[in-house]
Image (spheres, rainbow, N blue to C red):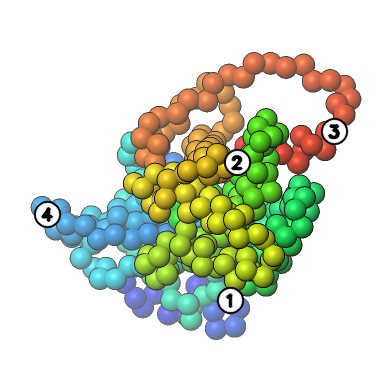
C-alpha cells in the first residue's frame, strides 16, 4: 500500500488507508467512514478533528475528541497514560487514528490506542470526504431564497433591501459556505441557507393564516435573522467560533452587518425599527442569548419558526434510517430519546396537480443530520 514520504518515522500508526501521491503531498482516499463504524470492531482511518478537550481524571489526563467526516461525527477518547503523549490537539487538524469502536449511551464511541496528526505538507485531503453539505447545493438554496423574496415581498424598499442582502458579494460567499450552527442543528456546509429558507417558508405559511401580520417586514427579518452566523462561525472542516463570534454573537453581528444596507434601502424608519426588534428578539428568552424578548406578533412568529426548524432538524437527524417504529440514541441537546412512529397510510392519487403555493412554502424535510 503506497505511503507518503516520512510517514513511518514519527510516533503513531505507520500507514495510511489509501494514498495517491500528488507532487510532494498525498491525496487521502478514505476507505471507512463514521457511518461504517460498528461497536466491537477495530478501525485505522483518517478523520477531521471537529473538537478536542483535555480533561483530568484520578489516574491522569484524558482527551475527549469529536472525529468527523462527510458521513457524520463520532466521539472518541484517549485515556491516560496514552493521553499524555498528545500535548496539543485542535479542531481542524486531520488525524490518523487506530483504536476499537465501543458504545456509550447507545452511540458508537471510539477508544483510541494511537493517533497521529497529519501535517499539511505531507498530504492534501479530499475535502468532499470530510465536509458534510446540505442535500441541495447551497447555490440552489440561495437562488430559491432570492426568488421567494421577489415573489412574496410587495413593498418595494423591502424587496430592494432583501435583493441587496442576497446579492452582496461578501454576504453571498460567506452564506454559501456557512453552517447553521456549530453542532446543534444544520451543522454542515449550506446549513445556514437551508435553515433560512425553511424559516422563511414557515413564516409565510403562518402569515397566510393570520393576515394581520406585517408579511413583508417579517419575511425580511426571516431572511436576515441568522446572517451573523456566517461571521460568528468558521466554515470548512472545523466549525468553531471566531473572535467576533465569541465576543459579540451572531445577533449583534447581524444587526451591524445589515444596518448599512438598511439605511440605503429607503425602508421607513418605523418599519426598520420593528425589523431590528424582530432580529434582536428571535431567540425568545434572555437565557437563550436574546438581547430582547419578543414584544410584537411578528417577533413571536419568527422566534417560533426558528425554533421549530432547529428542532425538526435535530429530530429527523437523530434516526439512523427512515424506518418507522425505531427509537433514536439519546439526544443530548433535547435531553431525551426520540421515537419514529408509524405514519397513517394515505392513498396516492394517480395525477396530483402541482400547487405552486404549496411548493413555495414547503420546508426541506426530511432534513439532513
Report crowding for label 1: few under 14, some 14 to 19, many 20 or more residues within 10 A (C-alpha).
some
| Proximity of marks 4 and 3: CB atoms separated by less than 8 Å | no
| 269 versus 303 height, above or below | below
Whole-number angstrom distance, CA of label 4 to CA of label 3 = 64 Å
- The mark found on residue 59 in the picture is 4
Judging depth in this view, the residue of 154 and 12 nearest the camera is 154
Pointer 4 or 3: first along the chain: 4
Whole-number angstrom distance, CA of label 3 to CA of label 1 = 51 Å
Which x, y percent locates residue 307? 50, 41
Pointer 2 or 4: first along the chain: 4
Question: Which circle, 4 or 3, is nearer the viewer?
Answer: 3
- The mark found on residue 354 in the picture is 3
> Where, quadrant-wise, is the C terminus in this rendering?
top right
Whole-number angstrom distance, CA of label 1 to CA of label 2 = 37 Å
| 9 versus 252 height, above or below | below
SS type, badge 2: loop
- The mark found on residue 21 in the picture is 1
| Proximity of marks 2 and 4: CB atoms separated by less than 8 Å | no
Question: Which circle, 2 or 4, is nearer the viewer?
Answer: 2
Pointer 1 or 2: first along the chain: 1
- The mark found on residue 367 in the picture is 2
Pointer 1 or 4: first along the chain: 1
Q: What residue do we see at 78% from left, 53% from top?
A: 150
Which x, y percent locates residue 174? 59, 67
Residue 245 visible, this orientation: yes
Question: Which circle, 2 or 3, is nearer the viewer?
Answer: 3
Report crowding for label 4: few under 14, some 14 to 19, many 20 or more residues within 10 A (C-alpha).
few
Which quadrant of the structure image shows residue 117?
bottom left
Residue 47 located left or right of residue 162: left
Amino acid at each position: 500500500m503506497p505511503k507518503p514520504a516520512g510517514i513511518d518515522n514519527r510516533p503513531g500508526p505507520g500507514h495510511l488507508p489509501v494514498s495517491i501521491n500528488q507532487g510532494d503531498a498525498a491525496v487521502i482516499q478514505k476507505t471507512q467512514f463514521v457511518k461504517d463504524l460498528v461497536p466491537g470492531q477495530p478501525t485505522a482511518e483518517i478523520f477531521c478533528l471537529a473538537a478536542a478537550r483535555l480533561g483530568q481524571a484520578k489516574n491522569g489526563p484524558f482527551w475527549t475528541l469529536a472525529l468527523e467526516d462527510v458521513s457524520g461525527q463520532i466521539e472518541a477518547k484517549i485515556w491516560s497514560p496514552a493521553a499524555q503523549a498528545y500535548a496539543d490537539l485542535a479542531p481542524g487538524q486531520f488525524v490518523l487514528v487506530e483504536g476499537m469502536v465501543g458504545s456509550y449511551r447507545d452511540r458508537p464511541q471510539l477508544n483510541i490506542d494511537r493517533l497521529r496528526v497529519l501535517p499539511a505538507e505531507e498530504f492534501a485531503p479530499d475535502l468532499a470526504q470530510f465536509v458534510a453539505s446540505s442535500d441541495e447545493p447551497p447555490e440552489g438554496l440561495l437562488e430559491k431564497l432570492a426568488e421567494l423574496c421577489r415573489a412574496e415581498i410587495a413593498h418595494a424598499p423591502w424587496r430592494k433591501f432583501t435583493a441587496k442582502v442576497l446579492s452582496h458579494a461578501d454576504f453571498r460567499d460567506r452564506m454559501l459556505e456557512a453552517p447553521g450552527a456549530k453542532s446543534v442543528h444544520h451543522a454542515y456546509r449550506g446549513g445556514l441557507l437551508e435553515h433560512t429558507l425553511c424559516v422563511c417558508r414557515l413564516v409565510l405559511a403562518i402569515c397566510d393564516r393570520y393576515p394581520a401580520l406585517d408579511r413583508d417586514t417579517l419575511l425580511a427579518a426571516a431572511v436576515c435573522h441568522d446572517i451573523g452566523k456566517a461571521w460568528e462561525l468558521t466554515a470548512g472542516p472545523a466549525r468553531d467560533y471566531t473572535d467576533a463570534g465569541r465576543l459579540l454573537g451572531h445577533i449583534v453581528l447581524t444587526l451591524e452587518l445589515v444596518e448599512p444596507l438598511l439605511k440605503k434601502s429607503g425602508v421607513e424608519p418605523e418599519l426598520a425599527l420593528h425589523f431590528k426588534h424582530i432580529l434582536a428578539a428571535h431567540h425568545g428568552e434572555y437565557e437563550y442569548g436574546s438581547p430582547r424578548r419578543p414584544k410584537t406578533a411578528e417577533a413571536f412568529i419568527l422566534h417560533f419558526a426558528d425554533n421549530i426548524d432547529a428542532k425538526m432538524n435535530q429530530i429527523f437527524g437523530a434516526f439512523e434510517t427512515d424506518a418507522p417504529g425505531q427509537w433514536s440514541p439519546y439526544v443530548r441537546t433535547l435531553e431525551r430519546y426520540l421515537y419514529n412512529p408509524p405514519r397513517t397510510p394515505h392513498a396516492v392519487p394517480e395525477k396530483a396537480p402541482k400547487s405552486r403555493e404549496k411548493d413555495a412554502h414547503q420546508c426541506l424535510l426530511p432534513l439532513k443530520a
